[in-house]
Each structure stands twice: as C-alpha cells, then as structure tokens.
Image (cartoon, rainbow, N blue to C red):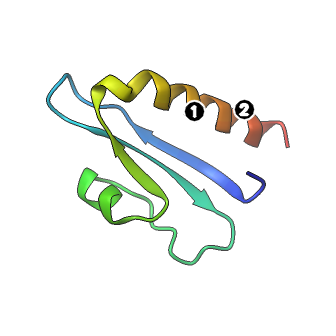
Amino acid sequence: MAQISEVYYKAPRKWLTNGWFGVVIIGDTKNAVVRSNAAAVKSQNAMVFTPTQQADIEALRDALLAAIVSR
C-alpha cells in the first residue's frame, strides 16, 4: 500500500461495456497509464471489471484514495 501513488478508474458504460481500474506503483518502470480496456488487459497493474462488479471496485478505489491522502 505504501508504494501506490495513484489510482485510476473508468466506470463501465451501461451494461454492455466493461470498466477498468488500475494503480501506479512508485518505482515501477512499467507504469503505463491505461486508457482503454485492451491496455488494461495487458497491464500488470490494472484490471477490467464488469458492470455487476462496479460497486465493489468503487469501494476499493475509495479506500485506496483515502489511504493515499492520509499518508
């Protein structure tokens, strides 16, 4: 957790498109900011999620952001 410097998130659009979630790790040279679902699939620091998983991913995102701010 101490190595995470940024969290990025894209919500799914309606029920037909998946969203993605990722983190930027301090010192990781392979930190490419994900800008599409295809890039999220290839990134080791990101994941694609379905619309049914959105609430859980948003809770994870909020918890990570709160931890980053509280450092």
The amino acid type, in three-letter code, at marker 1 is Leu
Q: Which mark is residue 60?
A: 1
Of badges 2 and 1, the one in the foreground is 1
**Measured along the vertical axis of the image, is residue 61 above or below residue 42?**
above
Image point (49%, 45%), residue name? 8
Left or right of residue 11, residue 30 in this image: right
Q: Quadrant of the C terminus?
A: top right
Residue situated furthest bottom in the rendering: 29
Q: Earlier in the sequence, mark 2 or mark 1?
A: 1
Left or right of residue 65, residue 41 in this image: left
The amino acid type, in three-letter code, at marker 2 is Ala
Task: Measure how far apart labels 2 and 1 are at the Cα level.
Answer: 10 Å
Residue 23 x %, y %: 55, 53
Considering the numbered disc 1 on the image, is that residue within a helix, a strand or a loop? helix
Residue located beneath label 2 in the image:
66
Residue 30 x %, y %: 50, 75
Image point (39%, 26%), residue name? 54
Q: Which mark is residue 38?
A: none
**Measured along the vertical axis of the image, is residue 68 above or below residue 45?**
above
Image point (76%, 38%), residue name? 67
Considering the numbered disc 2 on the image, is that residue within a helix, a strand or a loop? helix
Residue 5 x %, y %: 68, 54
Sort mark 2 into few (<14), some (14-19) or many (20+) by Cα contacts within 10 Å.
few
Sort mark 1 into few (<14), some (14-19) or many (20+) by Cα contacts within 10 Å.
few
**Measured along the vertical axis of the image, is residue 25 above or below residue 14?**
below
